[in-house]
Amino acid sequence: MAQTGKLIVLAAYSKTDDGDLLPAFEPRQIETEEKAMRIARTMAGEYAGVIAWSRDADIALGDYGPPTILFQSGDLPDME
């Protein structure tokens, strides 16, 4: 049986003294989109940039749909 669902991720970035963006911590998987947005809003004042996003996922096959941004604030690196 395939494991399907949503992959919901929260990431934050800090700036170095030179102005470069670095991950503030390893991206975190969050249980729900609502929780991810709530945490991201809270963190927005603490980091140079914050983003929460989700995508449909079939974990067994390693298939992932396109990402949907749930919340973003501040400076973020280019996402590929």
Image (spheres, helix red, strand yellow):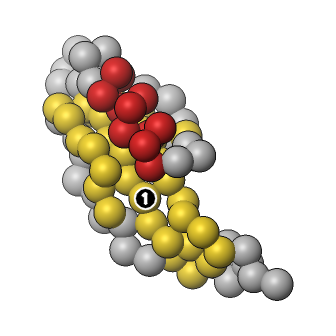
Q: Residue 42 falls in which quadrant of the image?
A: top left
Residue at disc 1, secondary structure: strand
Task: Answer left or right for 78 relative to 22.
Answer: left
Task: Answer left or right for 45 relative to 42.
Answer: left
Q: How many marks?
A: 1
Q: Give the labeled residue for mark 1.
A: 54
Above or below, comparing residue 4 to residue 28 in the picture = below
Location of residue 20 in the rendering, given as x and y in whole percent from the top left corner: 23, 30
Above or below, comparing residue 18 to residue 53 in the picture = above
Residue placed farthest to the right in the image? 1
Q: Quadrant of the N terminus?
A: bottom right
Q: Quadrant of the C terminus?
A: bottom left
Residue sitting at x 20%, y 35%: 73
Decide: few, some or many residues near mark 1? Use Cα within 10 Å; few <14, some 14-19, many ≥20.
Answer: many
Above or below, comparing residue 46 to residue 1 in the picture = above
Location of residue 15 in the rendering, given as x and y in whole percent from the top left corner: 26, 23
Location of residue 32 in the rendering, given as x and y in whole percent from the top left corner: 52, 48
Q: Residue 55 falls in which quadrant of the image?
A: bottom left
Residue sitting at x 50%, y 53%: 8
Task: Answer left or right for 4 relative to 9.
Answer: right
Residue 22 in sight: no
Residue 75 in sight: yes
Residue sitting at x 51%, y 41%: 27
Residue sitting at x 43%, y 43%: 34
Q: Name the amino acid, label 1.
A: Ser
Location of residue 18 in the rendering, given as x and y in whole percent from the top left corner: 19, 21
Q: Residue 61 falls in which quadrant of the image?
A: bottom right
Taking depth in this image into account, of 79 and 63 the one nearest to the observer is 63
Taking depth in this image into account, of 37 and 27 the one nearest to the observer is 37
